[in-house]
Image: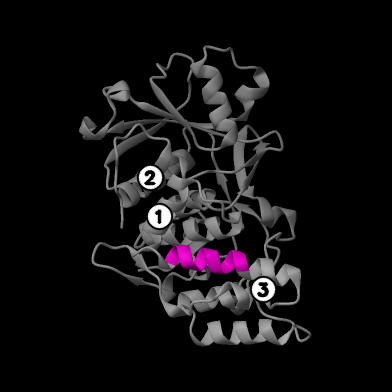
Amino acid sequence: MKDFWVSCGHHLLDRDEGGGLLVTDDFLKAYFARPELVPPAEACAAEQDLHSALLADPRKPVPSHAIAAIADPDARENWQVMLAFRDRLLGHRTLEAAYLDIVRRGVKIPHLFLNQLVHVILRNVLDGCEDPYVLRAAEIFFRPQRMTLHEGSLILADEETIAGISKTPLSPLVSMLGIPAEAEIDVMNDDNAEHYFEHSDQFHVALDLSGGQRGHHALAQVMTRWIRHLLAIEVDLEPFTEARDADFTWYAGLDAEGTRIGDALWNGEELSETLRNRIAGLYRLTFRDPSGVIDKARGGPVYLILAVGADMVMRFKPQNLVTGLPLKHVEGPT
């Protein structure tokens, strides 16, 4: 079986009998080893002691006065945010359950942490997958993508990679792997797709998301598996190309711009050419068992809208596949 996305830390986690991810001490220690939390040489004794204590026992309860004793205000804030996130993870049996609680309650956590959580859960969802198109499409879930029109094709490339400078500090795992800050961009095709596994942590392969190409079908597969894993619901999902005649009984935007476009269509507004050009994908979702669907939406499909912002960057929101579907109460993982 081919491995991929080693930098997400999935190998540091255990699984329960249902396939959910169990937090381990080693996984927590990887967070405490992040550059933002490693005290500099000039850090005060309180910060140094706290860091050492948590590396020794990453589940150790930390009283508020231990944080207040840290002299540097930025360091205090970093530790407050990190420990609140740690405690939220430890408050649930699995990472999946913690993620569901975060997105359902609208808990405010740093985008970095939320994307990392999606990254490692998605690695679990796709364990055993050997289709590089599906894996590349899955990167959309946790890494912003820049869309470019090239020779009539819609090409998605990793925003941080093409910028040349990552806005996110490298994790210790990425540093250990020796992943370069910049990498040459190639568009995935049948000739180079199998090489994806050799450099999956570099995020330097672009994806053709043109209508009728494999990218849309691959992304539909990822969304189907995400919903099945988190909600234990079976759906069929297919891409289509024209929303003009769609009966919008229910819709969900897969990003902020997609939601705005869906709202306009719902209200019967005519989309401007600018908004139409921002649509990157349309998907029709049907439930195999409609008994769990609310009455208002039962019997009809759910339309999913994927778009890019004015800056031509796609910021996918996988949480909308949890909170945006017309479902009766669903427990999901615990």
The alpha-carbon separation of the residues under discs 2 and 1 comes to: 11 Å
Sequence-earlier tag: 2 or 1 = 1
Picture coordinates of residue 110 (x, y %)? Answer: 60, 56
The alpha-carbon separation of the residues under discs 3 and 1 comes to: 49 Å
The label nearer to you, 2 versus 3, is 3
The answer to which of 204 and 14 lies nearer the viewer is 14
The answer to which of 276 and 191 lies nearer the viewer is 276
Residue 34 in the magenta stretch? The answer is no
Sequence-earlier tag: 2 or 3 = 3
Circle 1 residue = 131
For label 1, count other residues whose C-alpha is less than 10 Å away and answer few (under 14), some (14-19) or many (20+): some
For label 3, count other residues whose C-alpha is less than 10 Å away and answer few (under 14), some (14-19) or many (20+): some
Q: Looking at the picture, which amino acid does disc 2 mark? A: Gln
Q: Residue at x 46, y 40 (%)?
A: 320
- Asked whether disc 2 touches disc 3, contact meaning CB atoms under 8 Å apart, the reply is no
Q: Residue at x 65, y 55 (%)?
A: 185
Sequence-earlier tag: 3 or 1 = 3
Left or right for 302, reference 40: left
Left or right for 75, reference 110: right
Left or right for 248, reference 228: right
Picture coordinates of residue 304 (x, y %)? Answer: 45, 31
Q: Which residues are magenta?
A: 80-89
Q: Is residue 324 above or below residue 260?
A: below
* Labelled disc at residue 68: 3
